[in-house]
Image (tube, helix red, strand yellow):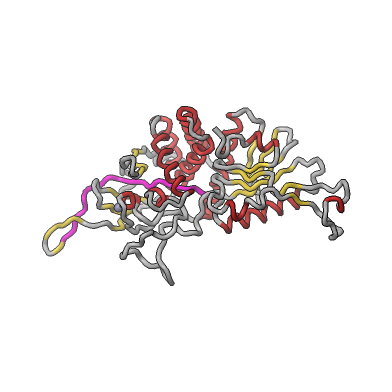
Amino acid sequence: MSRPMSLPADSLHAINAVLDAAVEFSKRKHAKLGYCVAAAFDLLVSAEYYQSMTHRGWTYCSEGPTMLVYPFTNTCPRCVSNGHFQFVKGNKPESGRIGMVTVEILCHILQYMFNREGKEAKVVKASEPIDMIIFDYRASHILIAEVKAAPLLTLPLSVTCEKQTEMLEGSAIASGHSATDNPFFKSSELNLLIPKTKDSEETPVPISVDWGASSPFYSAIGNLVSENRSFFETYYVYWHRAFEAYCGRNRNDPPFWLTNGCGQPVPRPDAWPSRKGSGYESVSDGKTSVGMDRTDDIKKGIFQVLKLGVEYKPSDPQKRIRTALMSNIHAVRHYSEYLESLRDIVWAIDESGTARLMADLDPDCAIYNLFDGILSFTRCDIRDAWLSSLFAFGGEDGV
Ligand SMILES: [Zn+2]
């Protein structure tokens, strides 16, 4: 049932380097380890996003110092930090292509965490209908999981550039904000751009990309976190602020507008474009999820976990098999409506069709948890001792 991983060795090296930095930062600053790992997940998925970068899709931002920006939501990340929405076309890759990689990154992160804590567990990417399997080395406990994972935030890339000019009535004038190509991005000095907040200045962080490497951006980010010890902290502070803004739907804090699924600008500027058909463009639409926090994903996920349970649990008399819904970030906005009332469900198979009480069932009739775990780095609901020991780092109390 397991499937070979496909990320090349230098990607794995980068994953370890980013996780080393996250763990080190968590220890040094007493930050919640699960949150630091969730931030690390976003940074690693970003590497995958950056790999699909092209010469098209850049934006000239006329705010000083002038820059070309490569954004991932549909608003200029610099201008929104200055309080105004400037529509740009975000460069989010197709979700199908990214989906497989997010599962694989999640597998590697979990394996790293279990190894670090001396847990004898092996994590593998699985094939349909299972996304991920975790088992202990004696296979006396086996988790089969449905994964719904997606990043909260992808930092834009930037390149400093000259102030652009254009001709108006015979005179050269400064150009305004505009979509543009970057014909030289492979020879440009690229930065990861951490936009300014109410408490911190804009920080372009130079990255050195070796275009001959098999995974240029994984290597670049791996080298960055290893060589620049303060980077992870600067990144995490911004990420955490975006996470808080996401949790509280705080549209007044600019990092909110870099998070996936943030919706339409409020207030909408007059020049904001309308969408083909009806309505207006969003900064990031509701079809884009954060973690498992999209209603369609949650509903599919619940069904899939139930189906996995029904297919695998009754034929496992030793009760080795557990089922879980797994993500990087929990269903922040939809937890209470979609998961809270289901998290403690247990089920049994009653072929008589008449049972109303447990006492009506055969005394040997097994009952099963719907969810042995609803698992993520930011919150875990667990009904199983083995999973509790494995995922002690996840969730709000994990330090
Ligand atoms: Zn701008």
Q: Nearer the viewer, residue 207 or 283?
A: 283
Position of residue 394 relative to residue 247, above or below, is above
- Side of 153 where 318 appears, left or right: right
Q: So how many labels did they put on this image?
A: 0
> Can you give x and y, in whole percent of width and height, for residue 125 in the image?
62, 44
Q: Residue furthest left?
A: 170
Residue 5 in view in this figure: no
> Can you give x and y, in whole percent of width and height, for residue 390 in the image?
64, 35
Q: Nearer the viewer, residue 188 or 71?
A: 71
Q: Name which residue lies at 66% across and 40% down.
A: 134
Position of residue 374 relative to residue 136, above or below, is below
- Side of 230 where 334 appears, left or right: right
Q: Nearer the viewer, residue 40 or 58?
A: 40
Q: Is residue 161 magenta?
A: yes
Q: Residue furthest bottom?
A: 277
For the C terminus, the image quarter is: top right
> Can you give x and y, in whole percent of width and height, for residue 347 in the image?
76, 51
Q: Is most of the magenta stretch helix, strand or loop?
A: loop
Q: Name which residue lies at 63% across and 38% down.
A: 123
When asked about the image quadrant of residue 122, the answer is top right
- Side of 72 where 335 appears, left or right: right
Q: Name which residue lies at 21% across and 53% down.
A: 164
Q: Is residue 277 magenta?
A: no
Residue range of the region highlighted in magenta in the rendering: 150-167
Residue 84 in view in this figure: yes
> Can you give x and y, in whole percent of width and height, for residue 111 in the image?
59, 35
